Amino acid sequence: METEKETELWYAMRATYRREPDAVRLLEKENLDCFVPMQYKVTVKKGRKVRILVPVIHNLIFVHACLSDLKRVKSKVTYLQYITDTRSGQKIIIPDNEMRRFIAVAGSYSDQLLYFQPEELNLSKGARVRITGGDFEGQEG
């Protein structure tokens, strides 16, 4: 008898206390796909400027998995938590096509990529955005 394969979804998750690298290693060891948006920052170490790759938003990690696999892995660690909608309490799930577009842009680690806080832009919730020039021209979300 053939069992129906569970659907893999993109879950927005939190890796508390800046443990994104630990979460990524664990998820990769368990053969689960994940994505942490990263960017280069210039910092001073021992009096020298160095460029390091750091998370854009600390604690944020996106995991692509079926729910049963994710529950199994999550049961092994306390620092990996679902991000939920505050009104409904539902786990936040990102559609595949939106994650593909997001990874296409955020996964480039381009120095030209700018990240904004919501209060820095005059956009209403749910507004569509399209990039009209540069390397990411045509991307939208």
Image: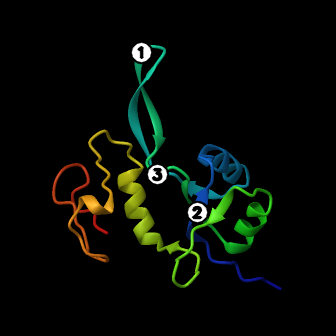
* Image position of 112 with respect to 60: above or below: above
The amino acid type, in three-letter code, at marker 3 is: Ile
Measuring from the top left, give residue 12's x and y in whole percent: 54, 66
Residue topped by disc 3: 57
Residue farthest right in this picture: 1
Q: Residues within 10 Å of mark 2 (few under 14, many from 20)?
A: many
Q: From the image, which quarter does the C terminus lie in?
A: bottom left
Mark 2 or mark 1, which is nearer the start of the sequence? 2
Q: Secondary structure at mark 3?
A: loop
Residue 2: x, y in percent? 78, 83
Q: Given contact means CB atoms under 8 Å apart, are the residues at marks 1 and 2 in contact?
A: no
Picture coordinates of residue 135, whole percent (x, y):
24, 49
Q: Amino acid at mark 1?
A: Arg
Residue 26, how many percent across, how many down? 71, 50
**Can you identify the residue that label 2 sits on?**
13
Q: Is residue 87 left or right of residue 21?
A: left
The residue lying toward the viewer, choosing from 13 and 105, is: 13
Within 10 angstroms of label 3, few (less than 14), some, or many (20 or more) residues?
A: few
Q: Which mark is residue 48?
A: 1
| Label 1, residues with CA under 10 Å away: few <14, some 14-19, many ≥20 | few
For the residues marked 3 and 1, what is the alpha-carbon distance in whole angstroms?
A: 25 Å
Location of residue 49 with respect to 103 vertically, above or below: above
The residue shown at (74%, 73%) is 68
The amino acid sitting under disc 2 is Met
Are the two marked residues, 3 and 1, in contact with CB atoms closer than 8 angstroms? no
The numbered mark, 3 or 1, whose residue comes first in the sequence reads 1
Q: Mark 1 and mark 2: span between their CA atoms?
A: 34 Å
Q: CA distance from mark 2 to mark 3?
A: 12 Å
Residue at 31%, 39% (x, y): give it. 111
> Mark on residue 126?
none
Q: Residue at x 59, y 46 (%)?
A: 18
